[in-house]
Every structure is written in structure tokens, then in C-alpha cells.
Image (cartoon, rainbow, N blue to C red):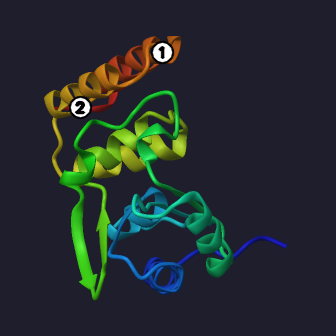
Amino acid sequence: MAREYLVAEEAIGKLVRAVEKTTKRPVEIILLGGLAMALYGRRRKTRDLDAEIPALTGAQLGRLLRYLNIPADLSKDVSHWGMIDLPPGYRGRAKRLWRKGRITVRVLSPLDLVMSKLRVMRESDIQDALYLIRRFKLTRLQIRRAMSRMIKASIPSTDLFFFEKFMEGFLKKRVRR
């Protein structure tokens, strides 16, 4: 049986309620992935919830997953989800959606979300990135600068070489401005 797709508002509400059960401390949640795309207006289905919750411990993240009872990728630091880090300062650029009591919900900025999508290099992520680039009129220069910051922040590896080559081709062929 295929899993149901998540609806952004319901998934976020469920996440917030689960966080409230997990800790009494102030918590900031940063959303990314398919839910972030939905919040930016992309009609897209997603089957999981991707979020960074830096205030929680590993044990608390585990409890949170049990409370949620939906597929989720949760972390204290999403920058290191792959060999290529997000551009430094992404937390400060995340857009505040709302604050309820001690919980603040943010979404990655459009440019940082583009870069999180492009570092994966899957076709569905490339299409998401193109949507954001067009919607928010992001330029080659903005993307190239973000790429440079990502490369400088990441641990040296051959993945950086492949990422840079992919990005140069992507910018040349797919980004007009």
C-alpha cells in the first residue's frame, strides 16, 4: 500500500505538538525539503518531513520521531546531511513563519533551499530548484556565490569537484540571468 502524501499545515502542526511533548525548552524548527517547497507555493507532493531542530538531543529527536509517527528526517544540523555543507549562515537567513509560545517555526530561505536541493543532484530536486530560481528571480551570481561558500565550508573531497562541475553546467544551461 502506498503511503499517503503529507499536507504541509497538518504535518507542521503535528511536528509542533510532538516537540511540545518532547521538551519544555524554547525550540526553533527549520523546515526544508518538500514541505518547504509547499510553503513557497510549489504544488508538490512529499512523503516525509525534513527539519532541523538544533535544541534537541539525539534521544529527544528519537522520542520526537515516535510521537510524530510519520516519515521524517530530523537533525540538529542539516548542513552536514551530505558531503557538501549548506552555505554558512543559513539559520540566520531562514524565514520566520510563526511563533507559538516557546516554539518558532522557520523555513530555509529560497536561495539556501535551492542550494540544499542542488547538492543532491536528483532530477526532482533540480526541478524544485528551478521553480524557486524563477519564482524568486535568483541570479547566477547569487547561486555561484552560495556555491563558493558551500565549497569553502565543506570537508575537502572529490564530491566537491563533481558538485562544482554539475553547478557550472546547471548555471550555464538552466539559469538565464
Q: Residue at x 37, y 77 (%)?
A: 25
* The quarter of the displayed image where residue 116 is located: top left
**Residue 48 visible in image:** no
Q: Residue at x 40, y 33 (%)?
A: 85
Q: Residue at x 29, y 45 (%)?
A: 112
Q: Quadrant of the C terminus?
A: top left
**Which amino acid, by three-letter code, is at mark 2?**
Ala
* Residue 171 image position (x, y, % from top left): 29, 25
* Residue 84 image position (x, y, % from top left): 44, 29
Q: Earlier in the sequence, mark 1 or mark 2?
A: 2
**Which amino acid, by three-letter code, is at mark 1?**
Phe
Q: In this rendering, would 94 be left or right of 35? A: left
Q: According to the image, label 2 marks what residue?
A: 146
Question: Which label is found at residue 117?
Answer: none
Q: Is residue 50 above or below residue 25?
A: above
Q: Is residue 123 above or below residue 95?
A: above
Viewer-proximal residue, 52 or 169?
52
Q: Residues within 10 Å of mark 1 (few under 14, many from 20)?
A: few
Q: According to the image, label 1 marks what residue?
A: 162
* Residue 173 image position (x, y, % from top left): 33, 24
* Residue 123 image position (x, y, % from top left): 53, 39
Q: Check whether the beta carbons of the residues at disc 1 and disc 2 lie within 8 A of each other.
A: no
Report how far apart the C-alphas of labels 1 and 2 lie in the structure. 16 Å
**Residue 143 visible in image:** yes
* The quarter of the displayed image where residue 118 is located: top left
* The quarter of the displayed image where residue 3 is located: bottom right
Could you say whether the residue bearing mark 1 is in a helix, strand or loop? helix
